[in-house]
Amino acid sequence: MKQGLTRHRERSARIQIDGEALRHNLGRVKAYAPSSKVMAVIKANAYGHDVLAAASYLDAADAFALAMPAEAVALRRAGCSRPLIVLQGFANQEELKLCSRYDLQPVIHQQWQAELLYSTSRFSLDVWLKIDTGMHRLGVPLEAVDQAYQTLKSAAVVHSIQFMSHFANADDPSHLLNNKQLESFINVIPESDAQRSIANSAAVISNVSSHLEWVRPGIMLYGSSPLLERSAEELDLRPVMQFESRLAAIQYVRKGETIGYGSTWQCPEDMPVGVVAAGYGDGYPRHAPSGTPVWINGHLCPSVGRVSMDSICVDLRGVDASHGDRAVLWGRELSVDTVASHAGTISYELLCHAGNTANLG
Ligand SMILES: *Cc1c(COP(=O)(O)O)cnc(C)c1O
C-alpha cells in the first residue's frame, strides 16, 4: 500500500508484517477445520496488517471477507481473483452495482436488500443471507428468514444463496448462547445441501460442530488468541505484526520525583527511566496504564506514567540498556494479547489502530 509505505517515514516507531507467520496461522485454521473451506477475514486493512500484503500471503484461503464494497473493489482491482464476500453487503444501488461489476458476494441482512435485488435485472450475483441468531447486530431475524429467502429465490439476478450467522460469545466456549445460536442457525436454513458459515476464530478452535461448510477466521490469522482462557502460544499461533521502536533516552530520576503528564507515577527510589520513541501518535494505546510491559534487551519493562504522543517512559531498573536499543511494543517477544489485557481492550483494537497509524516497513 503506497499510502502505508510513505506515511510517517520520519518516525522511529515502525511495523513489520511477518508473511510466513500469516501462512502458518492459516495452516492452523486448516488443521482445526480440515473439512471446511476457509473464508479469511481481512476487513479494516486486514486488521491493520496491509490488506494487499495479507491477501498475497493468504493465497491458500478459499475466499476473502471484507466489511465494505469499496474494500473489496480495491482488492479486486489489485488483481485478486478469489471470491470476495462483503460482510455488510451493499448500502444502496451504487454499491450494488459495484458488487456486480467487481463480482463481489454481498451479505444480505435486511429485507430491503433482498427486495432491491428482486427489482434489479441484467446481472448475476452469488449472495449470502445473514441470519440473526442472537447477536442482534446484523442479520434477518429468525422469523423473517423465510420471507427474505423467498424474495432472494425469486430474484432473477440471484445465482446462488449461501447462509451466514455470527456468534456473540464464541470467545467464552462455555457460554450457553453458543449452542443455542448454532441450533437456531442449522434449523432455520431452508435448504438441505446449503453452504453455511457461522464459525469465527474462537469457534474454529473451540466448537467443532460449528465448522459446517465454511469457517470465517480473522484474529487467529494474525496470531492473537481468540479465546479468553488460552494464549496464542498454547494454540501455536504466531504473531504477524511486529511493532517496534528505539530507546530515545535514559534518564536517572531521583526518589520521590514523578514521571510524565499528570505526574501519575512516583519513583520509589533513585532509578533509571527509559524513554521509548513510540506513543499514541503511532497508534500505541494512550489508556495503557503504568505497568504495561515494553520488551527491551530480554526484559519486560513496566511503563511508568502516562503514554505521550511520541513516547512512553519505562522502568529500567535492573536492565542493561543504552540509548538506541530496540524496544518492542508487541510482536514476537511480547504478545499483543498481554498489552491488550493491561490496556483493558482486545488485540483487535490495538492491531487495527497501530497498523493503520504507524509507519509500515
Ligand atoms: C470480523 C468478523 C469475523 C472474524 O472474527 P474473528 O473473531 O476475528 O475471527 C467473522 N465474521 C464476521 C461477520 C465478522 O464481522
Image (tube, rainbow, N blue to C red):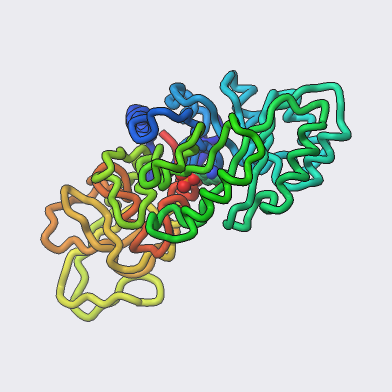
Residue 9 visible? The answer is no
Residue 330 in picture, x, y percent from top left:
32, 48
Residue 4 visible? The answer is yes
Residue 240 in picture, x, y percent from top left:
36, 37
Residue 356 in picture, x, y percent from top left:
51, 44
At a point 26% along the width and 77% down the height, the residue shown is 266
Q: Nearer the viewer, residue 309 or 40?
A: 40
**Side (left or right) of 281 relative to 190:** left
Q: For residue 32, what is the image quadrant?
A: top left
Q: Is residue 270 above or below residue 97?
A: below
Q: Nearer the viewer, residue 291 or 234?
A: 234
Looking at the image, the residue that sits furthest to the bottom is 256
At a point 39% along the width and 33% down the height, the residue shown is 33
Q: Nearer the viewer, residue 131 or 180?
A: 180
Q: Is residue 142 above or below residue 7?
A: below
At a point 52% along the width and 28% down the height, the residue shown is 52
Q: How many marks?
A: 0
